[in-house]
Image: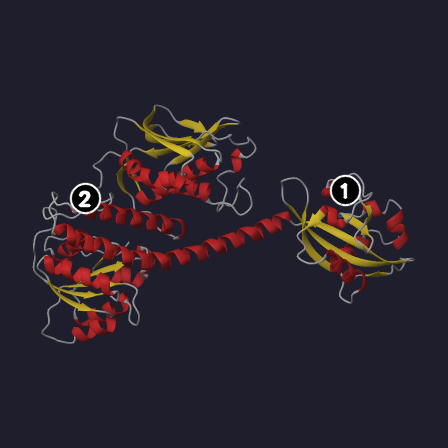
Amino acid sequence: MCAINVACDDTTMAVIFAACPQHSTDDLTNDKSFHKVPVPLLKLAINGDLLMANAGALRLLDINSVENLNLRDLMDGLGQSFNEWLNRSAFGVHHPSSEFLRLKRGETETFLQVTLSRIMEKDGPQLFAVLIDATALKTLEGQFVQSQKMQAIGQLAGGIAHDFNNLLTAISGYCDLLLLRHEPTDQDFPDLIEIHENANRAASLIDQLLAFSRKQTLRPQTLNLQDVMSDLIHLLNRLLGEKVVLHLRQGAIKCHVRADKRQVEQVIMNLVVNARDAMPSGGDVTIETSVLRLTKPLERDRVIVSRGEYISVKVIDQGMGIQPDVLPKIFEPFYTTKPMGEGTSLGLSMVYGIMKQSGGYVFVDSVLGQNSCFTLLFPAHQGPVDDNYTLAAPVTKETLPARAEGVILLVEDEAPVRAFAVRALQLRGYTVLEADGGERALEILQDPDLLVEVFVTDVIMPGLDGPAWVRRALKSRPGTKVIFMSGYARNFLDDEACETYQSVFLPKPFSLTALSQAVQEQLSDAAQLPQTLP
């Protein structure tokens, strides 16, 4: 075996020269042995000019020859000076040097790991460059970074939602109190209704923000999809902007399904936003609901839909359609045809996941150059609609729960929320003891003669949080009912809290009516068995 004057202790380079042990450096750069090296290989001058490329390198770089080409012409994204990198590789102490570079080749991003190793020629040092296609590795790295970013966004959204929901609780709560002092014929009544409705819309918007990032279990309920679509129109129009016109076409037959309302809304929002992005110059988006009866199984896209009755929701755009080679991939996580930096690359994969979890199906039909149509199929459900899915209605004297009696301990660190809740419960006839934290609540409960029937407490507070102080209090008052309230998602409570307490969860923002009903239900002798958090 001939000695080769190559400064290389890199495993990759060692493999290359091990493939041709009978040749010297001159052999490798001048005869066809160079082209037999089993990996893409370049020979470079120290200024980056390409001197030679083997067949693997020519294919990878998509070039026919190396004539008049410099490494800078083919690659970018180094993050440092090319001259510094090349000089360090040729004259530095630390070698070989490996960097990830982006290949300048069309619209498709290709990443290469380029490892430079010095070779000594008669007229001075030159460089060998080993090229490895690292696109899959960089894609995986990008997906990991994206998922970490979405997790961070979720944590940030949760914190913002908590604070914002406290504000909305106070806004909508005091609005309820004002509505009780005004008749519908009063001049200010329509203004108060407008405040109330916009507070509801803000609460819905916060829910949509949380729905993307939080891990939540399904909370199915019977929905009329036509009502859901009608309630969502205002938010969808905001998302679409001025260039896009939204049309809603609903069938005459009621469309009842069993699904999680928030997740259904998320599916529709994602599809509508996707339709908007497909029409940068504007156009029409149409949502159609109808009943579909299958007399025999439907087979398409490697899926078999059983015969039966389904509720169909179609979202149709006027975009340029989807490339046939892209269609099989559009529901894959992190797959996107949008420019770098736009979108989360998760919208359609979320649609697919939610529909599958809900027992439904999603299909896409697209005509290149014309439009795309996404079809959702929900199993039809026979049964009455749950009446707790709509936005909270404005409170009136007629809709208030009947006056009642009972002693309530209300624990809330946010003064505006606490003040509203105390007034709301006192208005219904309850005796209310208030505390601004868990420590103060336990001090109040030290009186053995004090009878408290319901604890109403915020979950997240400075010092002792809701579950912590309730856990201590129930040791001496095991029969007391509990209402947890929070601006965070319901699953923020730990499993022990869910299993231990005879509790219900009241999400913020809540209305005067919702708070009164929750307390009344907990006090009712006819209540169901002790409830636990799901």
Classify 10 Å Cα crowding around label 2: few (below 14), some (14-19), many (20 and above). few
Q: Residue furthest front?
A: 187
Mark 2 or mark 1, whichever is nearer to me: 2
Q: Nearer the viewer, residue 519 or 377?
A: 519
Question: With respect to residue 441, does 506 lie above or below?
Answer: above
Question: With respect to residue 141, does 435 lie above or below?
Answer: below
Q: Earlier in the sequence, mark 2 or mark 1?
A: 1
The amino acid type of the residue labelled 1 equals Leu
Q: Circle 1 sits on which residue?
A: 58
The amino acid type of the residue labelled 2 equals Pro
Q: Position of residue 148 (x, y in %)?
A: 49, 56
Q: Residue furthest right?
A: 122
- Where is residue 66, by image quadrant? top right
Question: With respect to residue 232, does 75 lie above or below?
Answer: below
Q: Secondary structure at mark 1?
A: helix
- Where is residue 339, by image quadrant? top right
- Horizontal arrangement in the rendering, residue 52 relative to residue 353 (left or right): right
Q: Circle 2 sits on which residue?
A: 190
Q: Position of residue 27 (x, y in %)?
A: 89, 50
